[in-house]
Amino acid sequence: FNSKLPNVGTTIFTIMSALANEHKAINLSQGFPNYPSSQKLNDLVTKAMNTGYNQYAPMAGNLDLRLAIAHKYELLYKSSYHPEKEITVTAGATQAIYTIISAFVKPNDEVIIFKPAYDCYQPAIELNGGKTIPVQLSAPNYSVNWDEVASKISPKTKMIIINSPHNPSGTIWSKDDMLQLQKITENTNIIVLSDEVYEHIVFDDAQHQSACLFSDLKQRSFITASFGKTFHNTGWKIGYCCAPEALMSEFRKVHQFNVFSVHHPSQKGIADYMQDAETYLGLNTFFQRKRDLFLNLISESRFKFQPSQGTYFQVLDYSEITDEYDVDFAKRLTKEFKIASIPLSVFNEKDKDDKVLRFCFAKTDETLLKAAEVLKHI
Ligand code: PMP
Ligand code: GLN
């Protein structure tokens, strides 16, 4: 047969986690916590299972959860999304992203993405016959040249995918970035897919610039989020997306046939848990403490860094240590030094290698201490 994705192999997350397991390395590669998710939340999901939430959820998601999500947008951004018409619960952000792309991108449509890019965007574009138009950003600031972006917009541009806080670089976009995006998409039919899975993990008192804060942008945007990232349970695969009604009804045409609905008891448990907004508002402080701990511990090392501005990832520049290709160095670190990380070149255009590795600090303090002890001596 003719592969539909001839250039796609296994994701780097699977590769590095498997290598970490094989070599019994500390796994700071794939982004997931190594501490338990909240007992209260687990109990609420169990309660949902014991009180009848075991059959199909409504296609768009459990209504209590959609109400809780709508409330969050009011509370944080004074932005309203209609819980019945403009919010859909998905199997993680991954399914939301795939379904959004699938619902809108036709053969030969162009989709602009910023590289390094989270790895599920491009295959989804290509599976739907679209063409990826990359805008490459560079270490250490990953700042956007908006003239370059504007120059890549064409009549074929169907969508622009953005991601702030940004995985893998740990940078965030400013209000000015969002205004620039709003300006260059004004009076076009371009759809924006704003991947905001790390919206609650922003540091040093910065504000997350959600696409819903900008009125023209909001009208053309899907925002997608992940409870796995917010509530420390990536294995549950519950996320959602929101968008104005006309966009969302198009999304649901596909959603109803590619998953219909997702795990019901988790949705009900999360809805009840979210009644207390502290459950998500406290994340910034929680992760900033971990970031600071990790960075203090490695401050004397030969790795160079700018503190992560958001996400639970820290990128480290290893150019003072070796000039090895980043994939090779990440593998050697795992095998010889027992620390697994993610090389950034795999997310770049033409495997551009800035000698940067990504480390996940959503780990117990004990794990961070152990990892730093090793990194200090490399
Ligand atoms: N987008 C980004 C930027 C991510 O880092 C991830 C991984 N959490 C996802 C999307 C997918 O999220 P989920 O695990 O909820 O599918
Ligand atoms: N989002 C996670 C990360 O960036 C990985 C998710 C996955 O393994 N697909 O590490």
Image (cartoon, grey):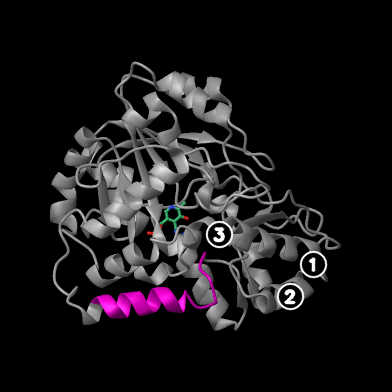
Residues under numbered marks 2 and 1 in contact, where contact means CB atoms less than 8 Å apart: yes
Q: Is residue 304 above or below residue 115?
A: below
Give how far across and how far down residue 178 sits, in percent.
Answer: 50, 29
Q: Which residue is mark 2?
A: 369
- Label 1 amino acid? Leu
Give how far across and how far down residue 12 sits, in percent.
Answer: 49, 62
Mark 2 vs mark 3: which is more N-terminal? 3
- Label 2 amino acid? Leu
Q: What's the magenta region?
A: 31-48
- Label 3 amino acid? Leu
Near-viewer residue (276 or 21): 276
Q: Nearer the viewer, mark 2 or mark 3?
A: 3
Q: Is residue 230 above or below residue 102?
A: below
Residue at image point 65% right, 56% down:
314
Residue at image point 40% right, 61% down:
227
Name the outermost residue toward the right: 300
Q: Which residue is mark 1?
A: 297
Residue at image point 43% right, 61% down:
276
Near-viewer residue (22 or 258): 258
Q: Secondary structure under badge 3? A: helix
Near-viewer residue (186 or 29): 186
Mark 1 vs mark 3: which is more N-terminal? 3
Mark 1 residue's CB less than 8 Å from ligand 2: no
Residue 246: quarter of image: top left
Q: Nearer the viewer, mark 1 or mark 3?
A: 3
Q: CA distance from mark 2 to mark 3?
A: 21 Å
Q: CA distance from mark 1 to mark 3?
A: 21 Å
Q: Secondary structure under badge 1? A: helix
Give how far across and how far down residue 278 sits, in percent.
Answer: 50, 60
Residue 283: give its label: 3
Q: Is residue 251 magenta?
A: no
